[in-house]
Image (tube, grey):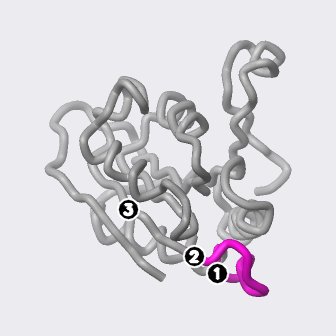
Amino acid sequence: NGEHQLCEGKVEGSMAPTTKVLIHSQGDSEGSLKHAIDHYRPRAVVLISNPDSKASRILDWIKSKNENLLGREVRDVDHAHLIEIEAFEQDSVLQMIKAVEKAKVWASSVLPKEEMEFFAGIAGGTKLIVVGMALAAIQGNLTSYYVLDPTHASKNNGDYILEVGFMN
């Protein structure tokens, strides 16, 4: 399992009561991540994906605060990390559950004095990865979110994020 990370200095300004951390199952498209960053405005993002995906490139876009691809709110992401797991193995679901635990430990190490709220994205990656993320969200009591296709966002008052409440 390869791990890559970015840590930059803390952005000054008013802080929310809790620090938001996205744990995002990442496929090859950045669209769902962009919508999640826009919606939650996290200080930290953990991408979990397989080594064959474009996740390392997307991590670089977070690092460079690429607003063209990830939206304006990416400016406020201070920490980003990539955890790679195998997407098509017998134990891929278990790998995802363990990766979510690693993500929480990593976030605690880079934001040690922060009270954190974790959000688990269940929209990207292979079906096995999504199942693993959903189970990890239930087990870890994380707020789960699904990113709607733009054609369905109108049913959610124009918001692309649909929180899946029954899971936690």
Locate residue 60, reporting x and y percent: 32, 50
Measured as percent of width and height from the top left, residue 168 is found at: 76, 57
Disc ID at residue 95: 1
User: Residue 91: x, y in percent?
Assistant: 74, 86
What is the x, y in percent for residue 100? 57, 70
Using residue 12 as the reference point, say whether residue 20 is left or right of it: right
Give the residue at x 78% y 68%.
128
Q: Nearer the viewer, mark 2 or mark 3?
A: 2
Q: CA distance from mark 1 to mark 2?
A: 6 Å
> What secondary structure is found at the residue carrying circle 2?
loop
119 relative to 5, above or below: above
Q: Circle 3 sits on which residue?
A: 81
Which stretch appears magenta? 85-96
Residue at image x 34%, y 69%?
Answer: 4
| Labelled pair 1, 2 in contact (Cβ < 8 Å) | yes
In the figure, 95 relative to 161: above or below?
A: below
Q: Which residue is mark 2?
A: 85
**Does dot 1 land on a helix, a strand or a loop?**
helix
Q: Which mark is residue 130?
A: none
Which picture quadrant has residue 92? bottom right
- Within 10 Å of disc 3 (Cα), the crowding (few <14, some 14-19, many 20+) is many
The magenta stretch spans residue 95: yes
Q: In 3D space, how far apart are the residues under numbered discs 3 and 1 (Cα atoms)?
A: 16 Å
Is residue 158 on the magenta stretch?
A: no
Left or right: 3 as drawn, with respect to 6: right
Which residue type carries mark 1?
Answer: Gln
Q: Identify the element where label 3 is drawn.
A: strand
Q: Quadrant of residue 36?
A: top right
Q: Nearer the viewer, mark 1 or mark 2?
A: 2
- Give the class, few, some or many, for how many residues have Cα within 10 Å of label 2's Cα (few <14, many ≥20): many
